[in-house]
Image: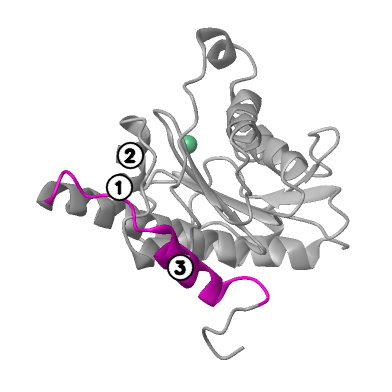
Amino acid sequence: MKYTELQESVFEANIALGNTDLVVMTWGNVSGISEDRTVMAIKPSGMSYNEMRPHHMVLVEIDSGKVLEGDIKPSSDTLTHIHLYTSFPTINAIAHTHSVSAVSWAQACRPIPAFGTTHADTFYGPVPVTRPLSEDEVNSAYELNTGLVIAEHFSQNGIDPTAIPAVLVASHGPFTWGADPMKAVENSIVLEEVAKMAMNTLLIEQATKAVPGYLLDKHYFRKHGPGAYYGQG
Ligand SMILES: [Zn+2]
């Protein structure tokens, strides 16, 4: 079958996410989009990590939101994922968790400031938080509207989703993304760590300010873009 490789990579990323301490119960999901951006594979709804196999990754058509085949229900967050893929053409995979520290910032409706180089290595600026969804937006097309407020925040504030591969949905939690499913999971792990560090930083010194632009630039561009020199190339 045509999308076997996509299902395999999405499966492996879901298992990797399930093996972190970011996910309890089945509160997490990863998806990935096909190269031609017509189909995504996403974790099935509420299926335990033990029983999950690659062929359970549900194939959903991006245009229609319809399941391509089989009768397994996709993650309830499917329409959020679809909206992010159509709004952010540079991203190929998405992860969602309810990890404790990132959720804590989301519940406080506060962006995570770039307090240090750990943050700047992955996120080129504060990790933003969306506006709250209105009562109408919650009561109708909730999951689609969740994607909508994310895309709205990035476009209204001129944020490049490649430079900041994460967001906090107000009163809900984090979504991260990346070039492939494993990278989206990695960004969830980094986000949780920087969320924890930022919280501890404020506990020690409430007046802490974000790092200066020159340090943010140094660390971000050491790892990203044409001048990157970190790692083994
Ligand atoms: Zn959620």
Residue receiving disc 3:
121
Q: Is residue 213 magenta?
A: yes
Residue receiving disc 1:
101
Between disc 1 and disc 3, the foreground one is: 3
Residue receiving disc 2:
105
Checking the image for residue 142, the label placed there is none
Residue 181 place in picture, x, y as percent: 62, 62
Q: Could you tell me if residue 21 is visible in this image?
A: no
Front-lying residue, 30 or 93: 93
- The disc, 1 or 3, on the residue closer to the chain's N-terminal end is 1
Residue 64 place in picture, x, y as percent: 85, 32
What's the distance in space between the residues labelled 1 and 3, CA to CA? 19 Å
Between disc 2 and disc 3, the foreground one is: 3
Residue 232 place in picture, x, y as percent: 56, 91
Query: Range of the magenta residues?
Result: 205-226
- Relative placement, left or right, of 73 versus 30 is right
In which quadrant is the C terminus drawn? bottom right
What's the distance in space between the residues labelled 2 and 3, CA to CA? 20 Å
Q: Residues within 10 Å of mark 3 (few under 14, many from 20)?
A: some
In which quadrant is the N terminus drawn? bottom right
